[in-house]
Image (spheres, rainbow, N blue to C red):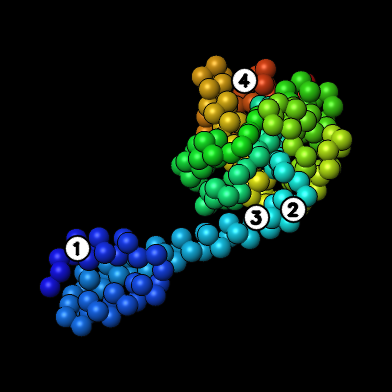
Amino acid sequence: MLKLKQIEEILAQCNNLDEIEKLKVQIMKEDNRKNVIKLFEKYERRLKIKMDLEREYQERCKYENQLCEKYKYIAGVDEVGRGPLAGPVFAAAVILDIKKPIIGIRDSKKLTEKARLELSKKIQETAIDFSIGYATVEEIDKYNILEATKIAMKRAVDSLKVFPDFLLIDAIDLDLGIPYLSLIKGDDLSVSIGAASIIAKVERDKYMKEISAKYPYYDFEKNKGYGTKKHIESILKYGPCEIHRKSFLKGILGDII
């Protein structure tokens, strides 16, 4: 009879559910301990999750696979931070190497902070190129959030060292003289846009955590500039700080600003 550790080592080598099932039949003939059953269930669940993520990844490569026949460098472009009351709007542009899959890429809002950090690191290590751009609070107040978002996206694309010959963009029409496709909910439909979403989110969150030390009253480290109850209460108590979007605060402060 094999020890649990030995069974687990064999299970770790299984690449599909059929292999696990064959091993299960073989082992369970002589060993039906509860811990053994639980071990098989654990690895079956783990492999199913992995297979689902791989399938989702392939589905999210649909646009890239179609476009790569004509275009060599396809950049995904997305923004983060259109809704907050404070802080810049960030954008990222990412040119992925589709032959090097990064399993788990999706809309950054659907990922935990830990998962975003891990994926951002993998994306930066394996991408053909990536870059970040942002539009300042002053630009948001001067032009409006939509135009500021376009500015951030343009800066991200312009900062790429590898010039893209096609853009996949999340729900924004952005005419930069480069062919593009705008996709509603693109960060969940395109792996390239999803990758841009993750990098932009990680970089913006990092900025808001760092700036929180300068403006401790507003809880930026936790709320990232979004209008939480505590954040709004702090604005009413202390007034806005330099990184608050004055055009976003009229409903809170009225004519005071």
Between 91 and 253, which is closer to the camera in this rendering?
91
Q: Amino acid at mark 2?
A: Glu
Which mark lies nearer to you, 3 or 4?
Answer: 3
Q: Quadrant of the C terminus?
A: top right
139 is higher (above) or lower (below) than 80:
above
Residue in front for this viewpoint, 82 or 233: 82
Residue 155 in view of the camera: yes
State if disc 3 and disc 1 touch (CB < 8 Å). no
Element type at mark 2: loop
In terms of sequence position, does the residue under pointer 2 or pointer 4 come before the other?
2
What residue is shown at x 65% (from left), y 30% (from top)? Answer: 131
Task: Please name the residue that numbered disc 4 is placed on.
Answer: 238
Q: CA distance from mark 1 to mark 3?
A: 38 Å
Q: Which tag is nearer the camera, tag 2 or tag 1?
A: 2
Q: CA distance from mark 2 to mark 4?
A: 56 Å
Q: In the drawing, what numbered circle is on residue 61?
A: 3
Q: Residues within 10 Å of mark 2 (few under 14, many from 20)?
A: few
Mark 2 touching mark 4, by CB under 8 A? no
Can you say whether 205 is above or below 192 in the image? above
The kind of secondary structure element at disc 1 is helix
Q: Position of residue 144 (x, y in %)?
A: 82, 31
Q: Which residue bears the numbered disc 2?
A: 69
Q: Position of residue 202 (x, y in %)?
A: 56, 35
Task: Tell me residue 89's x, y (percent).
Answer: 70, 31
Q: Is residue 208 above or below residue 167?
A: above
Ranked by sequence position, the earlier of labels 1 and 4 is: 1
